[in-house]
Amino acid sequence: MTLSIRELKVSFGKTQILRGVDLHLERGDCLALVGESGGGKTTLGLAIMGQARGSATGEISFQGKDLLKISQENLRELRGREMAMVFQNVEDALDPVQRIKDQIAEAIMVHRSISAKGAGDEAMQHLLSVGLNGEKAGMYPHQLSGGEKQRVLIAMALVNDPDLLILDEPTASLDALTKADIIGLFRSAILGRICIVITHDLSLAAALAEKMAVLYAGRIMEMGRTADLLRNPRHPYTRGLIRSYPAMTATKDLQGILGRMVHGLPGCPFHERCTQRIDICSRQVPPQMEEDSRIIACHRGGIVPLLEIENLSLAFDSYSVLCDVFLSLYEGETLALVGESGSGKTTLSKVIMGLYEADRGVVVLEGRRVNKRDSAFYSRVQMIFQNPKESVSHRMNVLDAVQEPLQVQRIGSHEARLRRAKEVLGLVELPIDDDFLKRYPHELSGGEVQRVAIARALALGPKLLIADEPTSALDPSVQAKILKLLMDLQDKMGLAMIFITHDIALARKISDRLAVMHKGRIVEIGATNEILSHPEHPYTNRLVHCASGKYEQGNGEEIMFQKVYY
Amino acid sequence: MNSASAECCLTKQEHKHSFGKMLRNLFPASFLNYIIALAAIFSLNFILPRLMPGDPLHAIYGDEAMVAMTPEMEAELIRQFSLDKSWWDQLLAYVLGLLQGDLGFSYYYKEQVSQVIMGALPWTLLLTGLALVIATAIGIILGIESGYRRSSSLDRGLVAGLMFLGGFPDFFIGILLLLIFAVSLDVLPLSGATSPYAGYEGLAYILDILRHLALPLTSMILVQLGGIFLLTRNTILILLGESFILTARAKGCSEQCIKYAHAGRNSLLPVTTATGLRIPHLMTGALFIEIVFSYPGVGSLLNTAIAARDYPLIQGILLIVTLTVLSANFLVDLLYMRLDPRVRYAH
């Protein structure tokens, strides 16, 4: 028993909702279809059921039959018997004027010659098996809660023991406890069948499906094992979805995907919203490539590594400051570099910037080894510093400071530079009137000067921003605003960031990955939430422990400083 | 408290509960509204002639009648209406009269008003009742088929045709049908409800009635049809987009089943409400139609009564028509409760 979909295209009027979907599922497979609304998830489910309203081309082969070719009557016989679908919008999915038992019995009677009483008894059994008591059977939909309605719908889908089960947003309107119950029910319901779960809810996808496909504007962008996909998304769209999903384990603030979905774009459907697009993306549809049992459709092969550091070592005289540092940073990612003072964080950043020459090791930027730091390098990599009042010259006004990198690199005419300066000042949400442009750093607040410094760093349009304690000189409110700004810039420009800090709580909120440095070595590196919840290295453990407000007293007892707040 | 008495208490309470439920099922909350409406109508009927200038007897019977009236009759009438007593006694007399079915005396027909009306009412009820039932049934079926096949030629044709028909006033269609079928083609009778002095019996009598009924009934149905059709069609269009239709289709239900058992069944709810609202319009429509076809119903009677300025008869007809409309609305309310479980269980 297989469900195999090839080149499925569904168009509704002039818009093509599905633009060529390929899927292959065997008995026992459960696939989660995720993606934003309007991506074609429900249309795909409806197309398989033969209920999509538009016209479909391609092939949907199920039990040896091409569902797009067989007659409506044959399709009707398959619906409800061999394949069943539970629709989203639980509140409206049941006929409001019929008793639920009758509605389930109807599903039995349309496919089998059975007496009304026999069907009623069977419906009753199914209602009991999904955990509803006999009293509810005679009720009308409006007398049931959302969870109970969902159970009725599941019972209805399962009465004829279908081989294919499609669940469309099955838990969207349920509270957490009911949802847990219903998920338990689904787990047993999907055994031995082919199952497709359509959902926005990544935690539901993880709970039910071992495979996951990400659908965007009618194409599959990425497909693979659910756990792999969630832990290590390769397509920028998948990463965007994960970043915008409020998971209990996520520590970084939510980041939405910029822009909105547009159907019918030439080339890669995602290219307008993608921060790593190149010319070919808007011209050619990316082919699906399979690698390590992961299918990905991206001209750049997924999220590109921006910076790679291999085996970097540096010693001042005989004192080793950096020792065998390996590091990689992907486009649009924030890596927090944490550790105590003197652990080599700032030194590492200075080596990357070329302020120190490494004794050994390689720095690779966008796939090319960096030998000399020329103007091209600095237009890709920029840095902001701890104390903005010192990093912005007090002899320059705002306009001069922001224009300086452009002048140094002799980019553009006078007017073009002014325009660019105003543009980046707008990006960092500073005013661009003449009065402000003529001000000097001492006339501005700390937060404003740091914004000027960020604008200056952005003037050349870098892809990598190294931020060395950029907010430690600012008060918490201004710090929060600067961090929000940096995250917004990351969304807009796909900016990768190395964020150097000793504040673990801060790192937790803004970074995707965390690298812990200790005595010139990176002792632990990985996803921020994983490292913080399960630190492996004893040094990390101590760091996290202390950051949580637990301090060891001399006698070995812990003082909970958090108690002060309660 | 021992368990037996607790049990007893419980069953007692349950009994009470189910009895209350039964009462509520029999008499919906809106029942009170009907009582209020009835009281208002009776009061108006009582007060209006007494508020008119001059002698209430004049107002009730009109000048012509008063001229022909002997002083003895006048004294008798004054006593009957308690016009020499206080308002309270008058009201009491009025209500007592109503309860006995006494609506006054029609001096034109020289008969009790109630009897005159009872002679005409069955014809009107037959005409309007049949028109209501047939128009609603056809309207719903056409609406379902049309809505289900949106934008097909059937749909377009029906929408255009029925809207065209619905735009005419009742009597105009009546006159048109009369001219075509009774005058030009001469296949159906011109007027009346039965052939006079034909002496038909049994089946022949019924057929005769139906032949007379055909034209007035058709004209009323044609006019009523458009509204029901459009409402059903629109409701179906909305319902077809609902999730439960998707669910029904995913179950494997046949088109026929989706059309009638799910979409059609649900479309009955707004159609029923609209039918209740349309009943007064149906009655006024019947008044015109009856005059056009000289159908011996309440409409023709009212026409005669107005021409003869037979005030007791006019008042009686208005009262009876209002009562009929209210009863019909009450029946529609009961029907709606049967149709929609959400209303049935809403307390």
Image: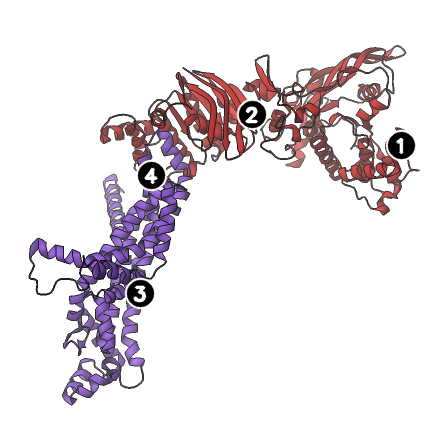
Considering the image in quadrants, where does the N terminus of chain B appear? top left
Label 2, label 4: how far apart the Cα atoms are: 34 Å
Q: Nearer the viewer, mark 3 or mark 2?
A: 2
Chain of residue at mark 1:
A
Which is nearer the eye, B226 or B190?
B190
Say if residue B277 shows up in the picture. Answer: yes
Identified by mark 4, the residue type is Lys
- Chain under label 2? A
- Pointer 1 local density, CA inside 10 Å: few below 14, some 14–19, many at least 20: some
Determine the secondary structure under disc 2: strand
Residue at the spot x=66%, y=24% of the render? Answer: A281
Q: Position of residue A369 (x, y in %)?
A: 80, 14
Q: In the image, what residue occupies the spot 81% across and 21% down?
A: A349
How is this picture coloured?
Answer: by chain
Please tell me whether mark 1 sits on a helix, a strand or a loop: helix
| Mark in the foreground, 1 or 4 | 4
Residue for badge 4: B259
Q: Residue at x 40, y 40 (%)?
A: B240
Q: Which residue is mark 3?
A: B37
User: Which chain is rendered purple in the image?
Assistant: B
Mark 3 residue crowding within 10 angstroms, few (<14) / some (14–19) / many (20+): some
Kind of residue at badge 1:
Gln
**Same subunit: marks 1 and 4:** no
Q: Which mark is residue A407?
A: 1
User: CB of mark 4 within 8 Å of CB of mark 3?
Assistant: no
